[in-house]
Amino acid sequence: MLLIGEHAAAGDRDLTLQTSRNNTVDLTLDFDWAVEEAQYCHLRIQLVDDSSKQQYMIHELENLSDSDQTVAAFTLNQDATQLTFHPRARVNSVRVRLRVQGTPDTRIVIESLDEPRNPEEVRTAQPVREIRFADLLLNKVLLSDTPFVAAKTATQRSSWSIQRADTDEIRIAGLQPVPVYQPNEPLELAAAVNAMTREASSVLTFHYSIVQLSNQKTVVRHRKSISINAAGNSDVIPITEVIPETPGVYEIRCHLSRDDDRIWDRLRGRETPIVKMGRPFFVVSKPETKAPTEIENWQVAGILRPSASNWSVGQWLPKRTTRFIPGVKSTEPATKLEQAQHFGETVSLLPTDDPFQASMPVLTPGTPHKIKLRLPAAQNIQLQIEAGGLDNRDRPATKFILSDTKTIDLKEQWRTYTFVHYPAEGDQIWLTNLGDGVLQLESIEVQAGPQHLFPPHADEDGLSSLPETRETILQVNDINWVESLTKDVQQRYPLDDFDARTINAFDLWLALDRLCDLARANGMSGIMLPANSGGNTLFETRSLLPRKTSANANANQLATTITLMANRGLKTHVLLDPDFMLLPVEQALLQRPALIQQLTRSQQGNAFQYNLLHPLVQESLEELLSELVFQCGQSDQFGGITIDCSGGSHLQPIQQMLDSDAALTTFARSLNVNVATEQLRAWSKGEGQETYNNWVHQATTRCFRELQQREPETAFTLKFAPSVHPTAQPRPAETDIQAFNPAENFPLGFGNRYGYTDSRLLVHKALRVPVPSEEGAVATSVYFNTKQQLADTALVQNQKQLLEDTCHLIDRLDPTTLAVKLPIDGRILRPQFDSLLQSFRTLPQTGMQSVNVESSAQNTVRVKSVRIGGYLHLACLCLTPWANEIDIETSQSVEWKAVGGNPEGIQIEKLNGNRARVQLAEGRLTLLRSSQPVGDTEITSCRARLSGGSAALAEIKRKVTLVAQRIGILFDFESYDALNNGGFEKAGNLGLVGWLHAQHPEGCVRVDDSQPLEGKHSILLTTETNTTARTWLVSETITPPESGRLAVSLACRAEAKTNAGTHRLRISLEATENGKPIRYSNEFEIPKNGQWGNREVQLEALNIDAANMHSLRLTIDSLSSGRIWIDDIRLHDQFPTVGERDELQSGAFLAVQGLQKSNLAPAGRLLQNGWARYLLKLDPLKEIEPKTNETELEKEEIPGIAERIRDWIPRPLRF
């Protein structure tokens, strides 16, 4: 909200009630402008009063528009009598709320100015319209055109309206900007009737009450007769109350009723209100108040076994329910769930795409319920899970997709997945099999628990006695996270009588409880909340006019949320993505449009991304951050601000700034040099490259240093993302992510973002990061994005992969802070992940020394030690996809005990002498501490070995053997059915079906039936020797693949020539992505021998942004003279790239060699490869296990495997 005046501190009360009085009219107006097709807009709203000697002005302004292009497009003149709206981009609509002041004769004049950037047919003149305040008081509406004119105008013409807001007749003041109170505090408010001319010169009854939302109980109720004067105003009505004792959300509710003789309505307190309004506030316990201890008692509410019920597939309600509903005829369902046996137990078979539905057993609505699904382990799972009310089938409270692949462990027969749901009475559960085959399901068990999923102040497995030197943060990026967590609230509570802002506050209260539950259940010590989504900010600022939505109407929502976190034991961090327009910069561009080349990256196609090195941009960002700190930094639970430096952020990575023409211009201006941009660009890439690069780094560092110095008490962290060029080939696994590495003494903390590849890929790219160089700076934070989407639904991955990748990040990057983004819609419980993060939080940050681990299997276990307070600490990290054990020998006897997360699950065996043996589970960080101070005791040796003996080694060999044997399966993948007539078999009267092609000379492209490779036809391209024209072929548009990658395979035959030689062919994929042309291309040669070659992949397009790619086509150009035949063109969207095939190829060879030398490390890397895991899970797991003797544990030879795969190692893999 844009205010005329100064900011009020977060805790100050403002009892100054702004209302109409005497001859001054104070109104709140709603202005709406809209057009069907987006266009440029230039509006002027002006207050005019020729006779008035009193001040008239615009006091407040709220932006209720739905476009980010509006946030910095408003300009208020110096005396606040004229508002101009002039955005740089096209918009569809503008909605703004104004509070204006004047007299009844003051006029509001609205003019739609000519905008030359619009096409001529849109630039139709609109009349200047005006309306008096006196008419607005009578609830009249001013329209841009009369209804007759509006009906005759074209759809391109815009329209607007202005009228008085419907909530303007009662005003209330006195609530704190952050309305959070403690019990028994005084509550002093003021209310008044404002310009209610329809009830002028009357006596009304003013009612106010305080209502608690959770139980709908009215805790305070008062009424008072008030007089309305001739102008429709009342005297100020003081409200003095005491804050209720019970924590929760309350509404202070005011309404007016007529003072009539309806005695019965008055006694019941149900008089018909003339007008009403409500405002929310929160009551929280005092900090020293200890929350009542909760007993963690989970009761089984019920077990659903589809095999033992009469539930059917595709039936909305079961027969036993519908038979009692009048008029509903429930026939016997045609499709029953079939049954099968799995290891002696009956399982139900869920067919593809048909939902299974059942009523959910509920003990206490609103409390967390654990829902456990038990399924056979030897199957791929792609299961959509929905839970919620029947009336909200299209908006279930819980909805996610459970994705997992079949086990490769022959001993694992069953898997159990547990997720959390907060049910209402009568909730249903729907399970939909999204996989290709039938899914087996044994049971659904529902457990009901206490008020909280995880007690807020419970000692976490002894963590309270250990110092926590690191932070684990649950990162929430969705600005609508409150709505995501409270979809059941409307079903459980009758809230129709409450104000929309009160309902939002209640949703926030419940959502925060559930978010904290989710954070604690996953081992987190803090939560990171978004401060904005584009121009929709959750904090007050003068740097822009932020958008407000119905779900985020409270401008102080972020500060309120942080204040409410005070007693929850979790730190609150704020994530800011400064990708929105800022008023100072936009006003400068409005006054001097030529500054766009200095202030923005317009020459690189980013006209709305600012140049960070420009002083005006730096000052504006500093002011913005100061406002954010002012509102959020008042709480002790505030953990700092993370600034996103990826995407369209104005704090873009330095590499982007080096390539920016705006940065070049700023560099020249800093030296008072006037040089053409082209000359500067050439100089910066040549002899001046080092000078220019140093200047950019120094200027950036200076910018960040000034930012930190302005807010020295706030921790700022910069979040960077590795940049990937759309046409770039993937790098080797160890160097595929190029992390940001700033210069020494960088003034702010920084961190790099890592995450999974697109969820639609058949095999996910392994999460691998390079080891930071010793001389390079080490990132203080790591941002791990595990959240994925499939058809706009959260996709939940298995726990094992998450454990492996998190351990890898901890081992490679050793961060101080680990921020993990988890899907909050799919609240899967991961107890092992919880234990890992709890252990990580207690891992000492400094002084850790690496311990030399003796092992024939290199790099399978990482061990570090540190001495703190006389106690010896060990951190043991298992890096292999199998369990290991380590023998620790010390100079004196030491009794070890496990600390951190879930210590009772760690086996420690005391051996003879000063040795101890510790079992290390895969994907596990184990912390050990001596039970007593040990003085100068040292670790004399540490030896690691495979846990499980010969059986475990045989299992590893079996898997490596299977990968080697199944390599050939990667030769051919299914086609992506998006290319029309790739085999040229379809004939058409008007030309080649599905293709455009060259027409001159005639017959240069034609269908040929003489010698096709497949089917009856192929395509023949003929290029004459004496022509400069190329022969070409272009496909129809292709739907971009959601997998993010696309390969083209085809077969070719060049005409035989006596002098042999080759024929050159070029194939390309061309499209527009984010409005820019993009091209993937490859040229290759075909021998002129007259023989068909094998169909081979000749082009790979990676990193495709399917959502923003348009007009994708396949083009084929013949670059040599002569004739060439092409046939069987196919597209593939699921395939291993050249780099991935090479990695798997070399990994398999090294694994075999390593096993021959008893080195298991290469086998570990191979079995962590995504494509290797894919190969292991293709066929049934009934394989012959190699026999292994105990004596083979340390050294064993595997004859035959290397010889079997040696033939294909040197050759490239082909489809």
Image (spheres, helix red, strand yellow):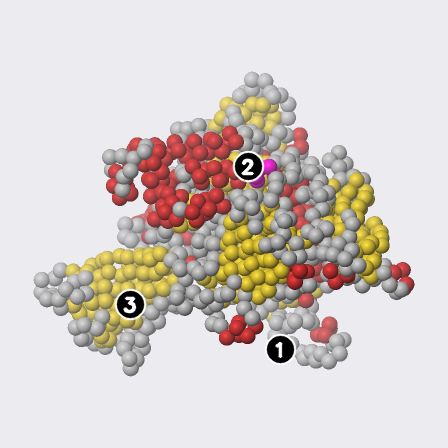
Please tell me whether residue 316 belongs to the stretch shown in magenta.
no
In the displayed image of the protein, which residue is found farthest to the bottom? 989
Please tell me whether residue 629 belongs to the stretch shown in magenta.
yes
Please report whichever mark, 3 or 2, sits nearer to the chain's N-terminal start: 2
Q: Would you place residue 75 above or below residue 435 in this image?
A: above
Label 3 or label 2, whichever lies nearer to me, is 2
Q: Would you place residue 1193 above or below residue 1107 in this image?
A: above
Residue 860 falls left or right of residue 460: left
Q: Splitting the image into 4 quarters, where does residue 161 fall?
A: bottom right
Q: Splitting the image into 4 quarters, where does residue 314 fall?
A: bottom right
Q: Which residue is mark 3?
A: 1034
Check if mark 1's residue and mark 2's residue have beta carbons within 8 Å.
no
Q: What's the residue type where badge 1 is placed?
A: Ala
Q: Which residue is mark 1?
A: 334
Q: CA distance from mark 3 to mark 1?
A: 49 Å
Secondary structure mainly formed by the magenta segment: helix
Check if mark 3's residue and mark 1's residue have beta carbons within 8 Å.
no
Q: Position of residue 191 (x, y in %)?
A: 76, 49
The magenta region covers: 625-631
Residue 210 falls left or right of residue 727: right
Residue drawn at 78 percent across, 42 percent down: 187
Please report whichever mark, 3 or 1, sits nearer to the chain's N-terminal start: 1
Q: Position of residue 637 (x, y in %)?
A: 64, 36
Evaluate whether residue 443 shows in this view.
no
Check disc 2 and report its element: helix, strand or loop.
helix
